[in-house]
Amino acid sequence: MPVITISRQFGSGGEAIARIVSQRLNYLLLNRATITEKLKEYDVSEPEFSQFDEKKILPGDGDTSELEKSYLRYLEALHNFFYDLAIRENLVILGRGGQVLFKDFPPALHVKVIAPYKNRLQRVQKLYNLDEAAAARLISEQDQDREEYLRHAFGCEWFDLDFYHLVFNTGILGLEEASDLIIQLARSLEHGNIVSRKDYEEQLMKESLQPGVVLDASGSPPAFAHPSEEEFARMLDFYRIKWLYEPKTFPLQWDSEGNITEAFSPDFYLPEQDLYVELTTQKQKLVWRKNKKIRRLKELYPDINIKIIYGRNYRSLLQKYGIEEKKRS
Amino acid sequence: MEIENSCRLKVLISEEQIDEKVAFLGKAISRDYAQVRDLVLVAVLRGSVYFAVDLSRNLSIPFILDFIGISSYGGGMEHPGAVRITKDLDVNITHKNVLLVEDIVDTGLTLNYLLKKLRIRNPSSLRVCTFLDMPEKRILDVPVDYKGFEIPDAFIVGYGLDYHEHYRNMKVIAVLK
């Protein structure tokens, strides 16, 4: 499901943009209020969340302190919570390293909202009814916390612009205009019209050889051709491996007029691993035709990384997890 | 465990072979980490406990032993959920040298998840030691720095590996038919 992450400088209006975007798109907004409530299901209490939310805990000397252990548990719970929700819901995630967690998530849009210091100071004074000195102190503390949180939790720099599709300066552009642009792009994302940078680079590379045909990048639940594929997809979901079902068809043979006479669509593509996976539940002696196609695929597209899971390996995988094999109905 | 009396079990790796290999791995790891401080052995519950304990006895360098547990895929359910850490580390591994100790690496799905989870804690180094490697079953390419035996795709029990909690304490590794 599409995920929009919004990273923001304190006082830049990023939170307001997140609210507008989530309301208009009817996406679930994950901000402080909603996360506090829902994280209780992950055994994170409200005081614990307030203590750790977007903050860095300094490591103590010697053995791990209880505080550090709680902090790591908190991060784990928060990230599990985000990933679990992203499978089921369209999300707008405010801060909390969403841009890192969903960096290679195919239907994702990563936004950073900044503003000149002067504008932020005015906004914070007005919003929290503070004098200039108190507002300045708050901005400095909040920005520092967020910066250190990213560094501590992910080893990443908050201002590494490589993470973002868009950077809005709300000192120049209004909140409404920025929100409109995000909504417009999110709708393209819903229709699969935005590809990730990795997909784009891969597509360019393939096109310079012999193009694969992009068939489906919508992210909607696929109609699996065989129950084994559905079970395999569940396994991947369980282990949080991102996948696409039959996203590309590779032409293998052409007639004299250039029409495609034979093609091959691997069952799965795992974008994080840049790996295609073909599942076959046929008996070994019947897979020669598929093997022949895969050999041809490797000849024509030598840079493609493909793994074949044969029937006996698939059955042993089911045995490992104590699953009974389902036949096609 | 009466292996000889069980027609379902065929010994694949003997007790002597296990001891020899564990000693070999212990030496290799002690040599490679000789100049390194803050080595943390992270054993994955529950299968790798036997191997981790034996391996640690064969190390001649200081280390901390800790354990991590994760939920297993059950399959068959409509909403199996997602993998979770069921027992977290007690030790902070940030800026420490971590050696993840596995009983077996087959699909790479579990190891891939664990490596991701440990990497975000910023250890100085993160390596993998597995007693058994089953490359035929591999789905994801995962790094394996130390391995005991490379074995074919079969249902393996013993030396920590179980079948419905049976055979875990066998001193040999056997194929369950």
Image (spheres, rainbow, N blue to C red):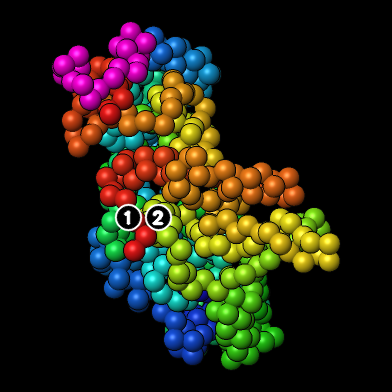
Residue type, label 1: Lys
Q: The residue tagged with tag 2: helix, strand or loop?
A: helix
Mark yes or no: residue A76 visible: no
| Local crowd size for mark 2, using a 10 Å CA cut-off: few (<14), some (14–19), many (≥20) | many
Above or below — where is B34 with respect to B161? Answer: above
Q: Quadrant of the C terminus of chain A?
A: bottom left
Above or below — where is B166 with respect to A254? Answer: above
What stretch of residues is rendered in magenta?
B1-19
Q: The residue tagged with tag 1: helix, strand or loop?
A: loop
| Local crowd size for mark 1, using a 10 Å CA cut-off: few (<14), some (14–19), many (≥20) | few
Q: Residue furthest right?
A: A256
Which comes before the other along the chain, label 2 or label 1? 2
Mark yes or no: residue A230 visible: yes
In which chain is the residue bearing label 1?
A
Q: With A168 as the anchor, is B91 left or right in this view? A: left
Above or below — where is A60 with respect to A74? Answer: above
> In whole angstroms, how far apart are the C-alphas of marks 2 and 1?
7 Å
Q: Which residue is mark 2?
A: A228
Relative to the observer, which residue lies in front, B154 or A16? B154
Q: Which residue is mark 1?
A: A326
User: Looking at the picture, how far across and down is residue A5, in whole percent?
Assistant: 52, 71
**Residue in view at x 16 percent, y 16 percent:** B5
**Residue in view at x 73 percent, y 64 percent:** A260
Residue type, label 2: Ser
**Residue in view at x 53 percent, y 51 percent:** A278
Q: Which mark is residue A134?
A: none
The quadrant in which residue B65 appears is: top left
B2 is within the stretch colored magenta: yes
Q: With A192 as the anchor, is A211 left or right in this view? A: right
User: Looking at the picture, how far across and down is residue B82, in whole percent?
Assistant: 34, 57
